[in-house]
Image: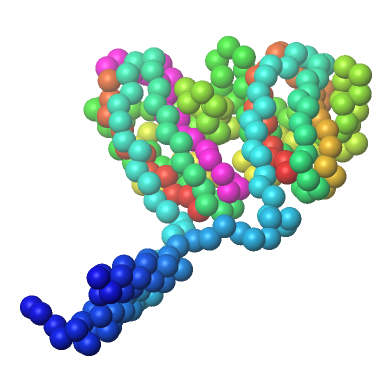
């Protein structure tokens, strides 16, 4: 009986000891907030703008890039630049505090450090549209 | 086998402890990680007239992604559209950033800077296919 108990205890020790090789949850959760990645898509008419509201759960960087601008019918990339902006929802619009005219690409084109709170990402015709387009913006926020 | 009562428990414990050490020792001698970037992936399939094929891939870090249509046909000289972008959230294709007409070649037809994240490659008929063709695309990504 005693031998059996010792065997169980030793096996338990074995399990705990080898468990050290397993990853553990981070203990410092205040500095490791995960970013949320969003793809914002829509269509844009000549001279128009659209926006998307989002909530930062913590202070951190918001990054964005204009991934795609295509003809609405053929979905063929046009390469036409659009204006990206980040701001604060105001009434039925988005009051931008940072804007940038960018051509489609796959690396971050705008990085803004923001506090926790509600913000908006705005996509607008920069004066280059000759016909409606479809767009896709990828952005991440805390 | 019967052990004397005064040796049984301690001998059993010693054996199990030795087993525990041996088990953990295996875990502690893990091989060193191998270099993982750049990574080459192969995307193969078939495109029908008027159709398309897409595949997503994930870049582990920022860097350069290159896309090469290495094989297509028959006929081997057929030209199709090759594009890169970000995947649609419903999984039905890509929001294209850049496209080029492409025939089979050894050199990349698309080379583009990317951030860490998920992207996609799309191959599509531009009107030249009269029958289904098989293809192979090489994706080199960070």
Give the residue displayed 45% in from the left and 62% down from the top.
A22
Q: Nearer the viewer, residue A48 or A129?
A: A48
Residue A142, placed above or below residue B75: below
Give the residue displayed 59% in from the left and 32% down from the top.
B97
Give the residue displayed 73% in from the left and 55% down from the top.
A30
Image-based side of A97 in relation to A43, left or right = right
Q: Quadrant of the N terminus of chain B?
A: bottom left
Q: Which residues are magenta?
A: B114-131
Place of residue B2 in the rendered image (x, y in percent of width and height, measured from the top left): 10, 80
Residue B60, placed above or below residue B49: below
- Which quadrant would residue A66 be assigned to in this image? top right
Give the residue displayed 48% in from the left and 26% down from the top.
B91
Place of residue B58 in the rendered image (x, y in percent of width and height, measured from the top left): 49, 44
Can residue B32 be seen in this snapshot? no
Which scheme is used to colour this image of the protein? rainbow
Image-based side of B45 in relation to A62, left or right = left
Q: Nearer the viewer, residue A112 or A127?
A: A112
Place of residue A77 in the rendered image (x, y in percent of width and height, measured from the top left): 59, 26
Place of residue A102 in the rendered image (x, y in percent of width and height, measured from the top left): 75, 36
């Amino acid at each position: 009986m005693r031998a059996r108990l010792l065997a169980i205890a030793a096996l338990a020790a074995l399990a705990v000891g080898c468990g050290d090789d397993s990853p553990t949850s981070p203990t410092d959760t205040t500095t490791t907030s995960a970013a949320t990645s969003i793809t914002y898509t829509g269509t844009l008419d000549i001279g128009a703008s659209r926006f998307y509201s989002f909530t930062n759960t913590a202070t951190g960087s918001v990054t964005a890039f204009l991934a795609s601008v295509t003809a609405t019918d053929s979905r063929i990339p046009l390469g036409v630049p659009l204006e990206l902006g980040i701001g604060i929802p105001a009434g039925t619009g988005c009051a931008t505090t940072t804007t940038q005219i960018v051509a489609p690409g796959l690396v971050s084109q705008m990085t803004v450090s923001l506090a926790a709170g509600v913000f908006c990402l705005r996509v607008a015709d920069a004066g280059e549209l000759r016909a409606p387009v479809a767009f896709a913006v990828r952005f991440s926020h805390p | 086998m019967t052990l004397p009562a005064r040796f049984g428990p301690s001998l059993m414990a010693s054996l199990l402890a030795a087993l525990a050490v041996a088990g953990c020792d295996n875990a502690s001698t893990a091989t060193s990680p191998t270099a993982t970037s750049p990574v080459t992936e192969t995307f193969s399939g078939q495109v029908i007239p008027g159709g398309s094929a897409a595949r997503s891939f994930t870049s582990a870090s920022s860097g350069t992604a290159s896309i090469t249509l290495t094989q297509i046909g028959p006929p081997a000289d057929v030209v199709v559209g090759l594009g890169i972008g970000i995947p649609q959230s419903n999984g039905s294709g890509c929001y294209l950033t850049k496209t080029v007409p492409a025939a089979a070649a050894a050199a990349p037809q698309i080379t583009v800077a990317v951030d860490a994240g998920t992207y996609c490659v799309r191959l599509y008929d531009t009107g030249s296919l009269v029958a289904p063709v098989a293809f192979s695309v090489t994706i080199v990504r960070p």
